[in-house]
Image (cartoon, rainbow, N blue to C red):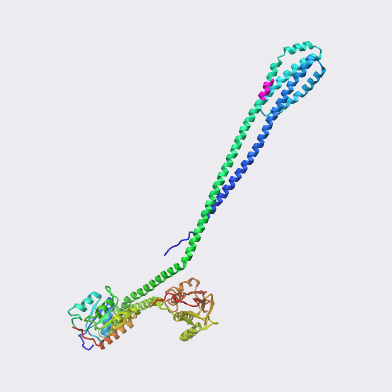
Amino acid sequence: MSEHQTVGIVMIEDDEGHARLIEKNIRRAGISNAIRHFTDGGTALDFLFNAPDGPALNGPALILLDLNLPDMSGTDILVRIKAEGSPLRRTPVVVLTTTDDKIEIQRCYDLGCNVYITKPVNYESFATAIRQLGLFLSVIQVPEVEG
Amino acid sequence: MPQTRIKLVANNRPIGRVLLACMVLGFASLIAAGVAAAWLTDRNQDHVRWVNHTYEVELAIANASIAIEQGETPRRGYLITRAPVYLDTYLTNRARQPATLARVGRLTADNPRQRANYAKLVALVADLQRQRDRTVTLVREGRGREAIAVFFAETDAKRMMAIRRLATQMADEERRLLKIRDADQASSVRAFYLVLGIAGLILLIVAILSVTTVMRYTRDLTRSRDSLNTLNETLEEQVAERTADLSLANDEIQRFAYIVSHDLRSPLVNVMGFTAELAATVTPLEELLERAETTAPEIVTEEARLAVREDLPEAVGFIRTSTQKMDRLINAILKLSREGRRVIAPEPLDIAEIVRNICGSMQHIIDDRGASVSVEGTIPALTSDRLAIEQILSNLIENATKYLKPGRPGVITVSGHEERGRVLLSVADNGRGIDTRDHARVFDLFRRSGAQDQPGEGIGLAHVRALAYRLGGTIDLTSELGEGATFRLNLPKTLTVQDQKA
């Protein structure tokens, strides 16, 4: 990421353990951006669109999204983010979930997700995948959020 | 789903019983009527005999009376004329008289009242006879006047009257008896008609009962036949409905397995992840311990050393192996559920070619284990899903090479033949065999048989069976412990896909 420290990472993941493991492995890849973690869709959406320090009002972000959330489906959040007129529609969304259902994957890409990653069951692969995601995050360009 | 129950005619048992009872009752009443008829005939004969007897008695009494009356005329003739012709007649008559009287006595011997009458009659007649004999004897001795005098003095007429009365009485008595017997006869006839009437009534009831039973039975039969016909007509429909239900249920199970395995995985990733984190902490701790041992040995307790060097690595190791095993099991379930969701694509297959490919890909394993795989005879052509068949056969061949009998080189034979539109594939080995008790069990998920000396989770055969079912087939095995095993796969020659789902 070109502008270090300014791009916040928003992680929407209901499993605390997964969230912790993801964060650790991202850190191991050398990413030091701030990570905001939400365990449910409602508060996450509120933060994304309404919080004064949230991405919609305060600079670029990157979203890590789990599809299985307690209060809503991750695809609903994806729809909101990528909707026409949304300030966040250009914000990169990485779907990071356990589902490897073909239809689900197609749907997410149709809705505008930028990367779809299936969480590997094997921890070693999981850790590797997250580290590689971290490396990937360190090189991608994130657009500015529209006013 | 319409549940058409056929009311089977299996309840013909009571019907049979009713019919049997009717028949028995009918025959019984017929027999009763016959017996009554025989009894009546017997009674009739008896009655006729008694009627005859009565007439005989009457006749005998009349004869005796006539004989007595006739005895008077020649006596009087002799008394007046003294002509010997009257005497002769008188004597002849007199000689016949006791026989006629005795006959009456014989015939009425059975009746005490008649016997009394008879005794009185005999006495009167004897008295009369004595009187007559006296007058006749007087005439014969020539004392005619004296005889006439006796004749006039005698009370003959009164005695004669008594004899007549007695005879009439006896005849009346017989008439009375006849009347009683007539009444008896009439009551017998009435009884007979009563028996006949009852028998007839029973027969009528039995007939009605039988007819209604048979009619009901026939109606039941017709009804079951109709419902059978209806059932037959809707059978196709019902089968289709059931199939739809079943595939729905199957889908549900597939989804369930998929969701469960997914949701089970989520916490498992945590367990494995944090175990790895925990394991990673062992190295710095150990370094710390080493440094402490060299710089300040007095602060290193035995407990701390054990905890870092043994307890921690051991615990982490157990957690790892267990979670890895759990991961494999969950993967197996997931694999099975995925297999159920996979789209089946039937194509013409050359089984011998597939077996050769499988052997090629696992040649080093086969060689390592000291086995040989061969295809016996020609295997009939088969249209089925390539991937599924490959997986089934490679699983079976892999198993065959895996469970050999120690000290016996493995010989694995794949063969096949066709039978009524089905293809039967066999994979036979000379390995350690499977205990008969475990024949059904080995196809269950996570179940294995025999010594657990080979790696594996008990997934292969479950997978094979699921695939076989998916291909519209079945799988079974014949085996004796220590004598090798033969797995037989029964598949449709041409697989047609009905419920194609994406």
Q: Which corner quadrant holds the C terminus of chain B? A: bottom left
Is residue B102 shown left or right of residue B28?
right
Q: Is residue B311 visible?
A: no
Is residue B379 shown left or right of residue B291?
right
Is residue B135 shown left or right of residue B383?
right
Can residue B74 be found in the magenta stretch?
Answer: no
Q: Which corner quadrant holds the N terminus of chain B? A: bottom left
Q: Nearer the viewer, residue B284 or B76?
A: B76
Where's residue B172, x and y in %? 65, 26
Which image quarter: residue A89? bottom left
Give the magenta-colored segment's residue range: B163-170
Q: Is residue A115 visible?
A: yes
* Magenta span dominant secondary structure: helix
Relative vertical location of residue B394 with respect to residue B105 in this rendering, above or below: below
Residue depicted at 75% across the width and 23% down the height: B97
Q: Nearer the viewer, residue B193 or B464?
A: B193
Where's residue B290, x and y in %? 28, 84
Q: Nearer the viewer, residue B105 or A83?
A: A83
